[in-house]
């Protein structure tokens, strides 16, 4: 993500790096694997507007499993409207950045040349300059999306702002990836735990059938499967009902 395609971009002002560091620290504190990632993404957008002097609004475009874009977070309603213009046409900075994994930045002149329809419509919402930074992929070869910053200035974003936003987005993006991988690992662990519990219940039920009917383990399992299919009930539930009936009889 080191390629910057720009036009008419000057170098006016460099925000203090300590502000970016503080913003990242705040994001890390807000990152909770137990919560939905949308809350974190909204805070990321808020910090982007605070950090970038020429930014008036920001949002996050996420690509779905089939590459369909959607706006997962935004600082204003106008962001979603400008994003939607790009989603409908299939073209624009947020689409290009998300699909190419390259930074896309354009001032008013460049935007009018590259996306005339978008540039004209976006001005209705006060947007003249565009900056889209691709998010790091959650897994190799995958496309994640982009953080989009929109500005009202016609002369675009300074190179220093582009560099800072790239650094900020990359760091935040890897934090998102780490959290999502943790959530995935936790979910897998829960599924494995449930599978082991189910296996234990089924094995106990097999033991009961083996003792009552004098059959081997395979035959006992087939009896459970047959009951499950005939009653259209999950195998674990059939096993639980059998064990419950044995406990009641013993009582």
Image (cartoon, rainbow, N blue to C red):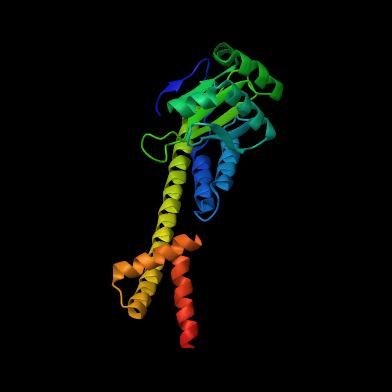
Quadrant of residue 52 within the rendered picture: top right
Q: Is residue 224 visible?
A: yes
Looking at the picture, how far across and down is residue 148, in whole percent? 55, 30
**Above or below, 205 relative to 2:** below
Q: Is residue 54 visible?
A: no
The residue furthest bottom is 251
Q: Quadrant of the N terminus?
A: top left
Q: Is residue 73 left or right of residue 225?
A: right
Looking at the picture, how far across and down is residue 83, in whole percent? 61, 28
Front residue (pair 48, 229): 229
Could you tell me which residue is drawn at 51 percent across and 40 percent down?
20
Looking at the picture, how far across and down is residue 213, in whole percent? 35, 77
Quadrant of residue 100 within the rendered picture: top left
Could you tell me which residue is drawn at 65 percent across and 21 percent down?
122
Q: Is residue 118 left or right of residue 25?
A: right
Front residue (pair 101, 9): 101
**Above or below, 5 relative to 204:** above
Front residue (pair 33, 127): 33
Numbered circles on residues, count: 0
The residue furthest left is 216
Could you tell me which residue is drawn at 42 percent across and 41 percent down?
138
**Above or below, 202 relative to 109:** below
Looking at the picture, how far across and down is residue 49, in whole percent? 60, 35
Could you tell me which residue is drawn at 40 percent across and 62 percent down?
195
The residue furthest right is 124
**Above or below, 242 relative to 68:** below
Front residue (pair 147, 54): 147
């Amino acid at each position: 993500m080191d390629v910057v395609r720009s036009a008419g971009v000057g170098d006016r002002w460099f925000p203090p790096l300590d502000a970016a560091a503080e913003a990242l620290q705040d994001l890390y504190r807000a990152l909770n694997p137990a919560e939905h990632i949308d809350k974190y993404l909204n805070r990321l957008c808020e910090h982007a507007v605070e950090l970038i002097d020429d930014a008036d609004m920001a949002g996050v475009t996420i690509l779905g499993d089939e590459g369909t874009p959607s706006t997962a977070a935004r600082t204003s309603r106008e962001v979603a409207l400008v994003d939607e213009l790009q989603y409908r046409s299939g073209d624009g900075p947020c689409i290009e950045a998300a699909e190419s994994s390259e930074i896309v930045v354009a001032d008013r002149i460049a935007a009018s040349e590259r996306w005339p329809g978008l540039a004209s419509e976006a001005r209705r919402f006060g947007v003249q300059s565009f900056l889209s930074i691709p998010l790091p992929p959650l897994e190799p070869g995958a496309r994640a999306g982009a953080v989009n910053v929109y500005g009202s200035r016609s002369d675009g974003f300074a190179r220093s702002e582009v560099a800072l936003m790239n650094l900020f987005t990359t760091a935040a993006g890897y934090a998102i990836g780490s959290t999502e991988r943790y959530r995935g690992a936790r979910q897998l662990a829960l599924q494995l735990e449930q599978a082991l519990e189910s296996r234990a219940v089924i094995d106990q039920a097999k033991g009961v059938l083996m003792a009552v009917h004098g059959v081997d383990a395979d035959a006992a399992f087939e009896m459970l499967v047959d009951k499950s299919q005939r009653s259209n009930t999950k195998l674990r539930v059939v096993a639980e009902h059998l064990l419950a009936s044995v406990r009641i009889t013993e009582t």
